[in-house]
Amino acid sequence: MAGRALSGLYIALPVALVTWVAPGSVAIFAAAERLQRICLQLLDAVPNVMQNWLGRAVEPNERNSRIRRAIAWNALLGVVAATAFTLSAPFISKYVFAGAANIPIQLAALSGALIFVVSISKATGNLALVALQRVKVITISALSGALVGIPLILLGSATYGAMGGLIAEIVAEVVVLTIQYTFVASAIKTNSLEADLASATELNARA
């Protein structure tokens, strides 16, 4: 619950922060935020479907294998989504916002990079950490992302406008992903060693 609350707060904050320190950039920043959030909501369907598939893995090595595949598939999906967003957002924004906020290709590329990072963290967080029973790490990573992201968004948008705000968001999401992936890799290694030890013990007992 705490992780979801932090995530919801962090999603709502960037536009408010940019409005506070860089009001002249808020229209284009909010436009990019809105389109990228729509894209991420559409991508949510993939990890949601994977939850049941991942949950059916009982044997530790099989679960670890499925976690690796889930992260890889979400990373690939993130590449596709990021590329599609980068190429289409400048054109879509002209029609969605009726010319009030035309997203340039540079800003679209930054939003695409953010979509890519978040796509992976959806797998490392809601899929892998939940399956590995390390849910508290999601809260830790979300809090760390907020602590890094909030001051960086204020500084970045005040200095470089919308682009600075988006770069700050990317840095914060990379922090989130790094923390999550570190714990996932460690848990997988531990589980694999325990599974191998249990298998060796069983074989010795049979002998």
Image (tube, helix red, strand yellow):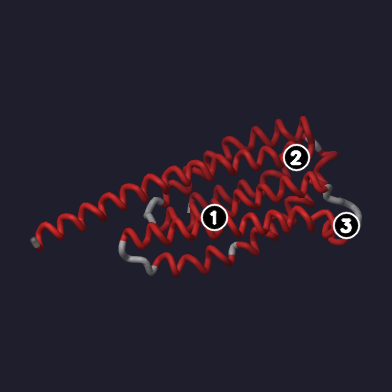
Disc 3 crowd rating (10 Å Cα; few below 14, some 14-19, many 20+) is some
Check residue 189 in the rendering and tell me which mark sits there, or answer none: none
**Which residue matches tag 2?**
18
In the rendered structure, the answer to whether residue 190 lies left or right of residue 17 reads: left
**Residue at left offset 44%, top offset 46%:** 137
Establish if 23 lies above or below 197: above
- Give the residue pinned by disc 3: 94
Against 6, residue 155 (above or below) is above
**Element type at mark 3:** helix
Give the residue number, with chain letter if any, for mark 1: 122
In front of the other: 172 or 23: 172
Q: Name the amino acid type tagged 2.
A: Val
Q: Earlier in the sequence, mark 1 or mark 3?
A: 3
Most extreme residue toward the right, as rendered? 99
Residue drawn 69% across and 44% down?
14
Q: Position of residue 85 (x, y in %)?
A: 73, 56
Q: Separation of disc 1 and disc 3 at Cα? A: 29 Å
Residue at mark 1 to residue at mark 2: CA–CA distance: 25 Å
- Above-or-below relation of 95 to 153: below
Q: How far, Cα to Cα, is label 3 from label 2?
A: 22 Å
- Horizontal side of 40 relative to 73 (left or right) equals right
Secondary structure beneath dot 1 equals helix
Q: Quadrant of residue 201?
A: bottom left
- Closer to us: mark 3 or mark 2? 3
Residue depicted at 70% across the width and 51% down the height: 112
Q: Are marks 3 and 2 in contact (CB under 8 Å)?
A: no
Image coordinates of residue 148 in percent, x first then y, are 59, 35
